[in-house]
């Protein structure tokens, strides 16, 4: 089972020709209210791909909780570790421009009250892989990573949104997934001096004996695993909205690795899923099924 420990948000996404400048109001063409949060998105992507997924997360006792959870429940995500707390459900304000690029502000609410102890030992014992992001309390992430390591789980962290991570936290990881901004923050936190993204990925992987995966948007992705570099191209698509594309990549990557795909295969599978997620508006509502991912993979051998 894949255990995702992370955030749930209700996303309110506005479409506009361009993103507003500081102090500026721009007129939008519409808005979409849909489920999001990096934890929820990664759990949902992995579940749609066919993985058994348990999501440990927190929502408030308010009107945003049900619409934030509905897709996860419909997809068959195990929500037995979900916490209902006296804090607002997380909410993200998103603006998407005509090129599909976005700006996001997150009010984390209940997500910051999610604790490692909300995950039972019995649940952890059933987890093959534990996947986390950085929209929850970093101290609680570290606590859960420590327990996950002790329980023999594979540990995977997506350092999004970007944070400086202590070396002791990096030492708890089997897999780190970052984009270019997140790589820069991670390298700074670890005190790594290497110049250039590829050298930084290699240095991080070597220093902490882990696999580092770098997503590069339309330029694809690269990974350093077991001392080797693997590169994958992106799948060309007409991007409508890139919101949650990185989450789709990460969730499907975790699922693909769990079912035994090697790194080149898993990276390609994740890149195909992420490309498809860019072709529709929204985060979870835009994620592809396994059949759709397989069809794209088959069309571009
Ligand atoms: O990565 C995209 C996600 O970031 C959105 O769904 C939003 O909720 C924020 O968490």
Image (cartoon, helix red, strand yellow):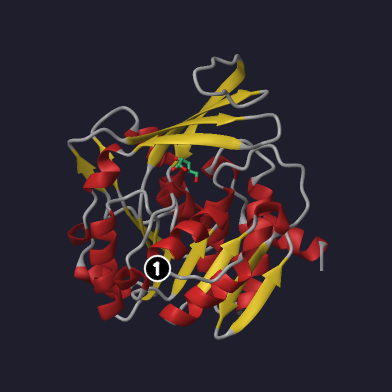
Name the residue located 57 percent from the left edge and 56 percent from the top edge.
180
In the image, residue 25 above or below residue 133: above
Please name the residue shown 71% across and 41% down the image: 239
| Image spot of residue 109 (x, y percent) | 28, 37
Residue 99 image offset from top left, x and y in percent: 71, 34
User: Does residue 81 sit above or below 121 in this rendering?
Assistant: above
Q: Residues within 10 Å of mark 1 (few under 14, many from 20)?
A: some
Task: Note whether 251 is above or below 35 in the view shown.
Answer: below
Q: Which residue is mark 1?
A: 190
- The relative height of residue 221 versus residue 97 in the rendered view (above or below) is below
Instruction: Tell me what residue is drawn at x 39 percent, y 63 percent.
Output: 189
Q: Quadrant of residue 154?
A: bottom left
Image quadrant in which the N terminus is located: bottom left
Task: Please give the count of numbered marks on the rendered protein.
Answer: 1
Q: Position of residue 290 (x, y in %)?
A: 62, 59
Residue 24 as seen in the image, left or right of residue 29: left
Left or right side of 118 for 259: right
Q: For the C terminus, give its image quadrant.
A: bottom right
SS for callout 1: helix
Nearest the camera: 173 or 39?
173
Expressed as whole percent of the image width and height from the top left, the position of residue 164 reads: 38, 58
Can residue 139 be seen? yes
């Amino acid at each position: 089972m894949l255990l995702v420990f992370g955030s749930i948000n209700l996303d309110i996404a506005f479409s506009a020709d361009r993103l507003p400048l500081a102090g500026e109001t721009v007129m939008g063409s519409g808005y979409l209210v849909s489920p999001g949060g990096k934890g929820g998105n990664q759990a949902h992507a992995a579940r749609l791909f066919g993985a058994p997924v348990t999501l440990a997360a927190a929502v408030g006792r308010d009107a945003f909780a049900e619409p934030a959870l509905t897709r996860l429940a419909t997809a068959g995500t195990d929500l037995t570790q979900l916490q209902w707390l006296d804090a607002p459900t997380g909410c993200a304000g998103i603006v998407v421009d005509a090129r599909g690029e976005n700006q996001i502000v997150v009010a984390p609410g209940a997500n910051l009250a999610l604790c490692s102890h909300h995950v039972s030992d019995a649940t952890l014992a059933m987890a093959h892989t534990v996947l986390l992001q950085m929209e929850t309390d970093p101290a609680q992430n570290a606590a859960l990573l420590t327990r996950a390591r002790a329980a023999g789980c594979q540990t995977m962290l997506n350092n999004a949104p970007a944070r400086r991570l202590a070396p002791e936290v990096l030492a708890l990881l089997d897999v780190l997934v970052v984009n270019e901004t997140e790589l820069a923050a991670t390298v700074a936190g670890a005190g790594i001096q290497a110049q250039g993204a590829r050298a930084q990925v290699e240095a991080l992987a070597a220093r902490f004996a882990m696999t580092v995966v770098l997503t590069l948007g339309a330029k694809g992705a690269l990974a350093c695993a077991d001392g080797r570099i693997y590169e994958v191209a992106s799948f060309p698509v007409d991007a409508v909205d890139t919101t949650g594309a990185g989450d789709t990549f990460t969730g499907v990557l975790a699922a693909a690795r769990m079912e035994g795909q090697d790194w080149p295969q898993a990276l390609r599978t994740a890149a195909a899923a992420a490309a498809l997620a860019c072709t529709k508006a929204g985060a979870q509502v835009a994620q592809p099924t396994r059949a759709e991912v397989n069809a794209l993979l088959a069309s571009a051998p």
